Amino acid sequence: MKRKSAHKGVRRIAAVLCAGFLLPYTIRAGQIQDRLDETGKNIDRLEDGADKTQSSIEAYEKEQRELQADIFDRQETIRALSEELDETRAKLSETRGEIKETQAALQESKAAKEKQYEQMKKRICFMYENSTEDILVYILEAGTLADVLRRAAYFEAVMDYDREKLDEYRGIIKKIKKEKEALVSEKEAIASLEEAQEQKLAQIDAALAALKSRLRENMAQLQDSKEKREWYAAEIRRQKAYEAELEKQKAEEDRRLREQIQKQEEARREQERKEKEQAQAKKEQEQKEQEQQEQEEPQGDWQRQGSDLELLSTIIYCEAGSEPYEGQLAVGSVVMNRVASASFPNSISGVIYQSGQFSPVASGRFAQALAAGSGSRCRSAAQAVLNGTRTVSCLFFHRNNGTTDGIVIGNHVFY
């Protein structure tokens, strides 16, 4: 047991020394990863704002179509009402002309009546101012009876004519007055209709002006939203370009770290080669002690394995929960490859919580998933890896963006 503890102590010291040597690389990688995480959050916020702006644009465009249709309907109503108003005004003007003509006819009939009346008075005065004897003499002086009758009938016909003319003129005047009254009544009705139509036209004009004002406001808001959408699109492109550049920097830092790890691995293998016999002896002794410890403390080992299983299944869930099973096995393999490497901590928890290595740990999502037990969804893959399954020999992976050569599984590249 003591020799095993001493051996573990040597491994810890070596791991600390390696970690100190690799610290600048891991710090730079962690800083780049922090910027990547922040850039990803910025892109998410920008895309959310772009989606909301697009929704606003669609709402404004719908409102614009409705306003344009409403304006068209109001304009058609105004056109039809204007035609009706023109017809009403024309009819009113025609009625006023007829009233003038009727008034002129009435005046003319009154003048004719007065003239006829004056002529009749003159004839009556003539007959009554001259003696009746003179009239009788005029009648009796006729040479024949026929002339006598004719002259007598003449005077009677003159009187009858005057009476008929007066009656005729009175009837014409009465008729014209009735026509005038009807025309005046019709004029008043048409004038009322004209006023009602003008009021209705004014109301529709006011409503149309309000709709046009709303349409202008809508068009201004739509233009502002479109400009905002363009700004979001440009900013998203800029942030994605920056994200791609950070991915390149991260890949470069990973490459440098991998090169240093390889150098350390080569040095370690050389040292291991020199101490092969002693290491083999120690290994055999450790295996015996390990077997003895497993027999003595099975429950404790089971609890440790259970803790590792939960940690491993949770990091697999956070990094590859939506990936195929092969991708989940590959993520678990990377973790276990690091545990086996002298360039990384020699425990699953140490590898997972190492600074700047796993973005879900830095963002806090890993802790939330661990507390919620979300790793149970990837427990099968984690258990297979703990049982010895290794699908890749890589120490690194990230989302595949075409900038890094490696093994592509699902949406990740392993290298």
Image (cartoon, rainbow, N blue to C red):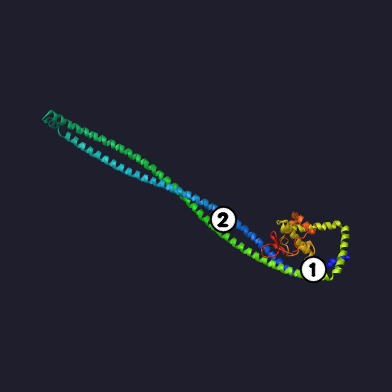
Q: Residue at coordinates 56% horizontally, 55% vertically from top-left?
A: 57
Question: Disc 1 or 2, which lies upstream in sequence?
Answer: 1
Q: Amino acid at mark 2?
A: Ile
Q: Is residue 375 above or below residue 84?
A: below
Nearest to the observer: residue 213 or residue 380: 380
Secondary structure beneath label 2: helix
Crowding at dot 1, Cα within 10 Å, few <14 / some 14-19 / many 20+, comes out as some
Q: Position of residue 140 (x, y in %)?
A: 12, 30
Q: Amino acid at mark 1?
A: Val
Which quarter of the figure has residue 325?
bottom right
Secondary structure beneath label 1: helix
Q: Position of residue 351 (x, y in %)?
A: 77, 63
Q: Is residue 90 above or below residue 265?
A: above
Residue bearing mark 2: 57
Q: Is residue 279 left or right of residue 68?
A: right
Q: Position of residue 374 (x, y in %)?
A: 74, 55
Q: Position of residue 318 (x, y in %)?
A: 72, 58
Residue bearing mark 1: 16
**How far, Cα to Cα, is label 1 from label 2?**
58 Å
- Residue 276 seen in the current view: yes
User: Which quadrant would the N terminus be assigned to in this image?
Assistant: bottom right
Crowding at dot 2, Cα within 10 Å, few <14 / some 14-19 / many 20+, comes out as many
Nearest to the observer: residue 197 or residue 34: 34
Which dot, 1 or 2, sits closer to the camera?
1
Nearest to the observer: residue 69 or residue 12: 12
